[in-house]
Image: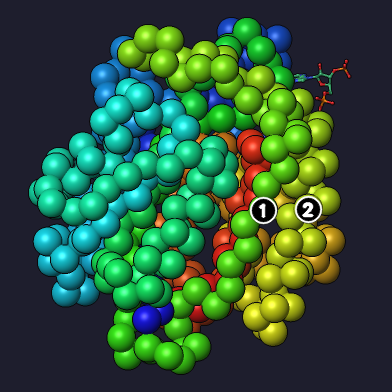
């Protein structure tokens, strides 16, 4: 059975923080941030907001479920919820269990997984493997991160890069395509290199209810890793599938990374949609937020072929080839 996206949703908190706003509290400026990263602004939760991760996950999921319901899905048809996050509100219960209850899908199987910026790719490929095996038919996959919990606004080299947000997709097994390659996940590759774990890390996310430890990053090392490894992985995936997609939907970490990947793949930039200018890097949420924008604007349609690719802490990376 092949997996098809039948609903998408996204949420970012109301508060917009521009580069100029950051320049008021640290030694930076709009010109540096825009030219080095492509970011103009990001959305961040108010510091005293409660249950930030859950709130974002619930709102994005509600929107994805409404879209899926318009296509005939009943909420009770969701059998599994997977939440990718590295910034849960608490160690346990899993965000996915709380989400199941809040969405009125109380009996669904539910778990979280953590792979930072590659988290959504891991959750999506896990969901499609479950659907492919016939174990579950309808799965809600959520990528959510509240990076403001881990940022040190005294560190200008990391704190300017991130935003808070959530994106969700409803994946559904389509029996019309059982045993054929007409639709769904045509290929998927996930890789990791734990020998370079120290390049991007955070010691704790549970220091207190609203704040975790602090994110540490060798930005240059992550940049070089992404630019070198992501095009290689995408090439390997596309060669395996034997096709070239209409769009490459990359993790939104830095506009210059997207440009460099496009160049190495010898593909034009208009095949690389982006929204990092408005939302910055929302970690596990970047890809589903972008997917939601592309579906709702009509830029992505049934039958389109797309590659999703994520990369980051681990170090880890992944790519999925999808026919929508
Ligand atoms: O999801 C994966 C998460 N990680 C990433 O996406 C990180 C990928 N890496 C990057 O995006 C880039 O490496 C950064 C944007 C983090 C940094 O860009 P860069 O071109 O690698 O700059 P750099 O770290 O080499 O710093 C260049 C200069 C330094 O000054 P000096 O030593 O040349 O005088 C920094 O101190 O820029 C300075 N700098 C800043 N200046 C103004 C660093 N951050 C800032 C800032 N504003 N916010």
Q: N-terminal of the two: label 1 or label 2?
A: 1
- Asked if ligand 1 lies within 8 A of label 1, the reply is no
Q: Where is residue 205 shown, x and y percent of the image?
A: 46, 19
Residue at 35% x, 50% y is 82
Q: Residues at badges 1 and 2 in contact (C-beta under 8 Å)?
A: yes
Residue 136 placement: quadrant: bottom left
In three-dimensional space, the C-alpha distance between marks 1 and 2, rounded to whole angstroms, equals 10 Å
* Picture layout, residue 159 above or below residue 299: above
In the depicted view, which residue is nearer to us: 307 or 17? 307
Dot 2: what SS? helix
Which mark is in front, 1 or 2? Answer: 1
- Asked if ligand 1 lies within 8 A of label 2, the reply is no
Q: From the image, which quarter does the C terminus lie in?
A: bottom left
Q: Name the residue under label 1.
A: 191
Q: Where is residue 155 shown, x and y percent of the image?
A: 66, 12
Q: Mark 2 points at which residue?
A: 229
Q: Say whether residue 150 is left or right of residue 224.
A: left
In the depicted view, which residue is nearer to us: 92 or 202? 92
Q: Say whether residue 322 is left or right of residue 137.
A: right
Dot 1: what SS? strand
Q: Where is residue 90 shown, x and y percent of the image?
A: 33, 23
Determine if residue 36 is in view.
no
């Amino acid at each position: 059975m092949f997996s098809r996206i039948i609903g998408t949703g996204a949420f970012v908190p109301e508060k917009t923080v521009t580069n100029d706003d950051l320049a008021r509290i640290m030694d930076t400026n709009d010109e540096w941030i825009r030219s080095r990263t492509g970011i103009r602004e990001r959305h961040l939760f108010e510091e005293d907001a409660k249950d930030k991760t859950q709130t974002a996950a619930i709102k994005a999921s509600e929107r994805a479920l409404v879209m899926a319901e318009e296509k005939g899905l009943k909420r009770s048809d969701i059998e599994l919820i997977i939440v990718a996050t590295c910034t849960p509100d608490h160690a346990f219960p899993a965000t996915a269990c709380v989400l199941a209850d809040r969405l009125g899908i109380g009996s669904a199987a539910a778990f979280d997984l953590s792979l930072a910026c590659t988290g959504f790719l891991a959750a999506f490929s896990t969901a499609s493997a479950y659907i492919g095996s016939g174990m579950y038919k309808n799965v809600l996959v959520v990528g959510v991160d509240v990076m403001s919990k881990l940022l040190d606004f005294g560190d200008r080299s990391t704190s300017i890069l991130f935003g808070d947000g959530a994106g969700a997709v409803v994946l559904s097994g389509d029996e019309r395509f059982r045993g054929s390659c007409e639709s769904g996940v045509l290929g998927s590759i996930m890789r990791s290199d734990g020998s370079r774990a120290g390049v991007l890390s955070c010691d704790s996310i549970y220091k207190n209810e609203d704040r975790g430890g602090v994110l540490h990053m060798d930005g240059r090392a992550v940049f070089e890793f992404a630019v070198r490894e992501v095009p290689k992985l995408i090439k390997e995936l596309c060669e395996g599938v034997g096709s070239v997609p209409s769009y490459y939907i990359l993790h939104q970490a830095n506009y210059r990374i997207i440009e460099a990947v496009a160049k190495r793949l010898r593909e034009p930039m208009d095949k690389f949609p982006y929204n990092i200018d408005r939302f910055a890097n929302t970690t596990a949420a970047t890809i589903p937020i972008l997917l939601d924008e592309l579906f709702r604007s009509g830029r992505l349609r049934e039958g389109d072929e797309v590659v999703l690719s994520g990369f980051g802490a681990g170090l880890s990376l992944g790519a999925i080839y999808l026919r929508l």
